[in-house]
């Protein structure tokens, strides 16, 4: 266990992300699809939440709306203290850059840059200064110290995804969103990355929201929320792979 008094000062009591009355409808008339049918949910700061449910239940739609990548049809979304549904494009882009980290299924690393340069790229694009101490802490915690000079193709899948996690953590975002972040990894590398995500909540106070189909991946989270047909249909605290599997089979997933 790494202890760091200077790095765990994030306030744990507030919600990182909140949605109220969230609706998303695609298309019009006969082709209309109600992907989100009025979602009310809060994601506490410093917690790791997994979103699960059958294919087509609205998981990605929910995540994309919460992250400001897609516009909601109705409802409100707060990230930290900011209501995002009323922001203009410029403010939203800035909020995404400063307050949100992303870890996707494909690692999305720049192939020509070293691991270290990939991690600092968002800070540099925002013309910010890299907090060297925080960079060292993250890369040490993620076990990347001796891989920083390597290009992505010289790294394993798990190492590449840990670079993507480090890149997301470096800006100290209000929340990190992951859509199947271990979907492309073998089970050992997946476990490595999920363990790191969990440690980032426990040791750095990071808030994480992850969509996954995998009950084992979900068992790393503090909480699992279950979706079905555009609605929230349940949740589990301190999930295990077995309890998640049982809850999913009740949904017919
Ligand atoms: N751009 C779009 N246009 C029209 N319908 C869409 C669009 N994107 C998603 N949908 C529909 O909205 C519903 C929810 O889709 P979503 O991608 O959120 O599901 P999901 O839970 O992420 O599924 P999966 O597990 O397969 O990734 C589905 O019925 C889908 O067909
Ligand atoms: Mg999806």
Image (cartoon, rainbow, N blue to C red):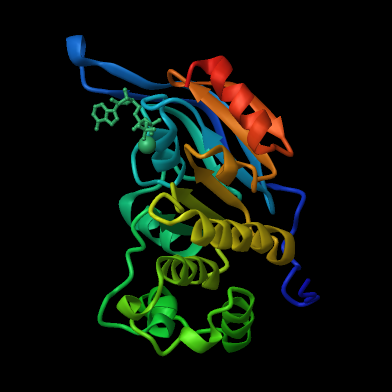
6 sits to left or right of 209:
right
Query: In this rendering, would 161 be left or right of 107?
Result: right
Please determine whether, in this image, residue 214 is positioned above or below residue 89: above
For image coordinates 45% across by 53% down, the residue present is 181
Residue 129 is situated, as x and y percent measured from the top left of the image, at: 49, 85
User: Is residue 168 among what the camera can see?
Assistant: yes
Ligand 1, image quadrant it occupies:
top left
Whether 17 is drawn above or below 25: the answer is below
Q: Does residue 173 sit above or below 225 in this rendering?
A: below
In the rendered image, is residue 17 in sight?
no
Q: Residue at x 64, y 37 (%)?
A: 241
Position in image of residue 124 (x %, y %):
39, 81
Query: Horizontally, is 239 left or right of 76 in the view?
Result: right
- Front-most of 182 and 169? 182
Q: Nearer the viewer, residue 172 or 150?
A: 150
Whole-percent x and y of residue 209?
Answer: 55, 46
Q: Residue at x 60, y 85 (%)?
A: 136
Q: Nearer the viewer, residue 184 or 16?
A: 184
Residue displayed at 44% across by 25% down: 54
The N terminus lies in quadrant? bottom right
Number of marks in picture:
0
Q: Quadrant of residue 85?
A: top left
- Residue 149 versus residue 43 in the image, above or below: below
Q: Position of residue 128 (x, y in %)?
A: 45, 81
């Amino acid at each position: 266990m790494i202890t760091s008094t200077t790095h765990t000062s994030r306030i744990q009591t507030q919600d990182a992300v909140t949605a109220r009355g969230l609706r998303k409808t695609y298309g019009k008339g006969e082709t209309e699809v109600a992907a989100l049918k009025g979602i009310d949910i809060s994601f506490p700061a410093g917690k790791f939440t997994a979103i699960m449910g059958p294919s087509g239940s609205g998981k990605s739609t929910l995540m994309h709306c919460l992250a400001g990548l897609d516009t909601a049809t109705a409802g409100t979304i707060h990230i930290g203290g900011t209501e995002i549904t009323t922001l203009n494009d410029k403010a939203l882009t800035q909020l995404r850059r400063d307050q949100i980290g992303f870890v996707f299924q494909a690692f999305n690393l720049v192939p020509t840059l070293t691991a270290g340069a990939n991690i600092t790229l968002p800070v540099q694009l925002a013309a910010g200064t890299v907090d060297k101490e925080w960079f060292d802490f993250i890369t040490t915690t993620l076990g990347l110290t001796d891989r920083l000079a390597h290009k992505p193709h010289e790294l394993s899948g798990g190492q590449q995804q840990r670079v993507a996690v480090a890149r997301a953590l470096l800006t100290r975002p209000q929340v990190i969103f992951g859509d199947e972040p271990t979907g492309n990894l073998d089970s050992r590398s997946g476990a490595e990355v999920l363990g790191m995500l969990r440690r980032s909540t426990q040791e750095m106070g990071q808030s994480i929201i992850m969509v996954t189909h995998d009950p084992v991946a979900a068992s790393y989270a503090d909480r699992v929320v279950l979706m079905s047909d555009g609605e929230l249909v349940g949740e589990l605290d301190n999930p295990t792979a077995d309890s998640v599997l049982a809850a999913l089979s009740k949904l017919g997933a």
